[in-house]
Image (spheres, grey):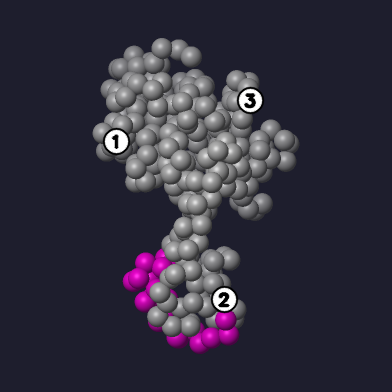
Amino acid sequence: MKTLHFRGVDPYTINKKSIAIVGSRQMTRYGREIVDKFVCDFVANGITTISGFMYGVDTEVAEKTIEYGGRHIAVFGCGLDIIYPAENAKLYDQIVKTGGSVVSEYDDSAKPHLWKFPQRNKIVAGLSSLGVLVIEAGENSGSLVTAKLAKKMKKKVYAIPGPINSKVSIGCNDLIKSGDAIMAISVGDIIKSKFKKIASLTRQNTKLQIKSQNFANGLEQKIYKVLEIEPLEIDEIAVKIRGSVVEIGSTLSIMGIKGLVTESGGKYYLNR
């Protein structure tokens, strides 16, 4: 590993138990939910997350790590005086202030260039102790480059399976199908057995929170149960629970105010 420039803490002091997480810049809602689920358990197990500090999955991983009280290492494809993308300026400061690190192999004033990002991917993979987790990757995604680099370094590669009709899941599904990545559906598939109990407890606590949900009436509970399976439009919910569209609509509005559901593109999603 090359000598790195860094701001914040020395990355080599917080990467002893760490995971690199990479993925599409065109992150879907599914990808966002996966990041939330996995990062929550990683932080609960004291695992540092690592990303390439770009749009999409990278940014989401960094933000969620900070939100859950964890530490993050962001690897730049430019100098540390050049914040790229510029929209992540606030995130840059938050990573440093929360005990994380922003790192680069380039001089502080070095500008970003396309050829530098594959170089950066070597550091993303190299810093990780647990390997690389791929969350949503298109057919020619740069995340697949990171996965290949990790394999060359004899590090484990994990991938999240995604919908077969999703363009940003093609890369992940192919990695799993070819045997180049281990399928991960929970943090327990990645972390060592001695940490699995903690991850399991985190999931159990989440399930208990759902079970103890204080529903105002039976209709709320029915709606919640069908949305646990998949996002649905009002008409689809009405068919599944055999209820009135009008009543369901007003109930969904109340559930939205309570923070139980979110509407997007005509469909309703649970806020997990």
Percent position of residue 115, x then y: 49, 21
- Give the residues drawn in magenta, as a range: 241-262
Name the residue nearer the viewer: 115 or 30.
Answer: 30
Report if residue 24 is visible in the image.
yes
For marks 3 and 1, the one nearer the N-term is 1
Q: Is residue 61 left or right of residue 203?
A: left
Q: Which residue is mark 1?
A: 98
Above or below — where is 235 with respect to 62? below
Q: Amino acid at mark 3?
A: Lys
Q: Label 3 to label 1, Cα distance in Å? A: 31 Å
* Residue drawn where x is 60% and y is 26% of the image: 155
> Given the image, on which type of amino acid does mark 2 rest?
Glu
Characterize the magenta stretch by its predominant secondary structure. Answer: helix
Binning the other alpha carbons within 10 Å of mark 2 as few (below 14), some (14 to 19) or many (20 upward) gives some
Specify whether residue 242 is painted magenta. Answer: yes
Is there any visible trace of residue 93 in the rendered image? no
Select label 3 or label 2 by which is in front.
3
* Mark earlier in primary sequence (3, 2): 3
Q: Are marks 1 and 2 in contact (CB under 8 Å)?
A: no
Give SS at disc 1.
loop
| Label 1, label 2: how far apart the Cα atoms are | 44 Å
- Looking at the image, residue 197 lies above or below residue 242: above
Q: Residues within 10 Å of mark 3 (few under 14, many from 20)?
A: some
Dot 3: element: helix
Q: Which mark is residue 151?
A: 3
Report the residue that reaches farthest toward the right. Answer: 178
Residue 30 picture location, percent across and down: 52, 53
Which badge, 1 or 2, is on the more N-terminal residue? 1
Q: Which residue is mark 2?
A: 236
Q: Quadrant of residue 70?
A: top left
